[in-house]
Amino acid sequence: MYNYVIKKILFSFLTLLIVVTLVFFMLRAIPGGPFTREKPLPEATRERLEEAYGLNEPLFKQYLIYMGNLFTGDLGPSFRKPAYSVNELLATGIPQTAKVGLIAVILIVILGIPLGVISALKANTSIDYGVMILATVGITVPSFVIGSLFILLAQNVAWIPVGGLTKPISYLGPVVALGGYSLAFVARLTRSSMLEVLRQDYIRTARAKGLSEYKVIFKHALKNSLIPVVTYIGPMIAALMTGSFVVERIFVINGIGKYFTESIGARDYTLVIGVTLFYAIFYIIMVLLVDVAYSLIDPRIRLSK
């Protein structure tokens, strides 16, 4: 297992290097630049800005300089927010995004999985139909619709803030909008996986041996049905914890999802690479944790050396 983890870490570093390299050169290939404006800057001013940020250097030299700084942990200055470095912007944006994402993840896990299990155990009953109707609504209604409806509701309720994260209750809207789809999907996925496991021969054998229904469900059926759920939850956590531009825009949250979208439009090269790198690192970590979780859920699964 340790050899497997070390090998994955080495491949992860290679993956990050490829991601940064591709994003670096793809951004430079896009027409325009950080100092391109609708009203063009004077030629002398633009040249001084490009010289100050090293954009007048040959492209490959810019790449080598950026990679050298990156290996020291310096993500560079923000081109469109000159008073801040990318490190500072991420340090202010990540906590805002992560708090909303973490609450959404907890909500999805503690509600989605139990709802799916209950729906499977009560298959083809009114409880099952009710859960599946709610799950279908959650999957089909986009996050921006949920967010907009919540804002309309909050305008008529004095104790619910309309925007920002000023109070604990202010997290309710962003969390529901951000996690609504994933909550519904996890419930449906858990239900279908649980139903499939309950039809297996070893479940019938366990019941025939006289095991209590509690042991059959929670010791045998649930553990095996969680494997596809864990496969989805890993990347889902990475997506939720790295922000959503739509949700952050609606609820006026200064998170990295908002920074990322604004930085693309502004050609803020260093900020785009910084946010992409953060997402890639988080995604790789979650995929690695999912692989490890497989062997914990089902001892028959062994990580290859």
Image (spheres, rainbow, N blue to C red):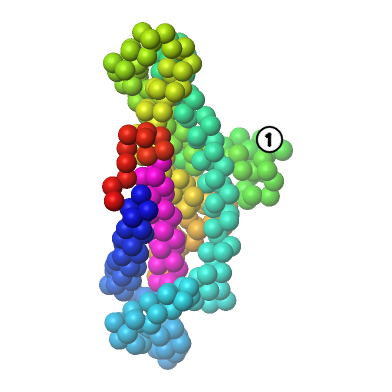
Choose between 225 and 147: the one closer to the eye.
Answer: 225
Q: Position of residue 105 (x, y in %)?
A: 51, 41
Q: Quick check: is 278 in the magenta stretch?
A: yes
Q: Residue furthest right?
A: 159
Q: Which one is nearer the viewer's eye here, 14 or 53? A: 14
Disc 1 secondary structure class: loop
x, y percentage for residue 117? 44, 22
Query: Is residue 206 depicted above or below 53 in this figure?
Result: above
Q: Which residues are magenta?
A: 269-293
Question: In the rendered view, would you say 159 is above or below 255?
Answer: above
Do we see residue 133 in this rendering?
Answer: no
Q: Which of these two is toward me, 185 or 217?
A: 217
Identity, as a three-letter code, of the amino acid under mark 1: Val
**Residue 267 visible in the displayed image:** yes
Q: How many marks?
A: 1
Instruction: Give the residue at mark 1.
Output: 157
Residue at coordinates 49% horizontally, 61% vertically from top-left? 259
Q: Residue at x 46, y 22 (%)?
A: 218
What percent of the width, then of the height, locates residue 116? 44, 24
Q: Quadrant of residue 220?
A: top left
Q: Main secondary structure of the magenta part?
A: helix
* Residue 119 placement: quadrant: top left
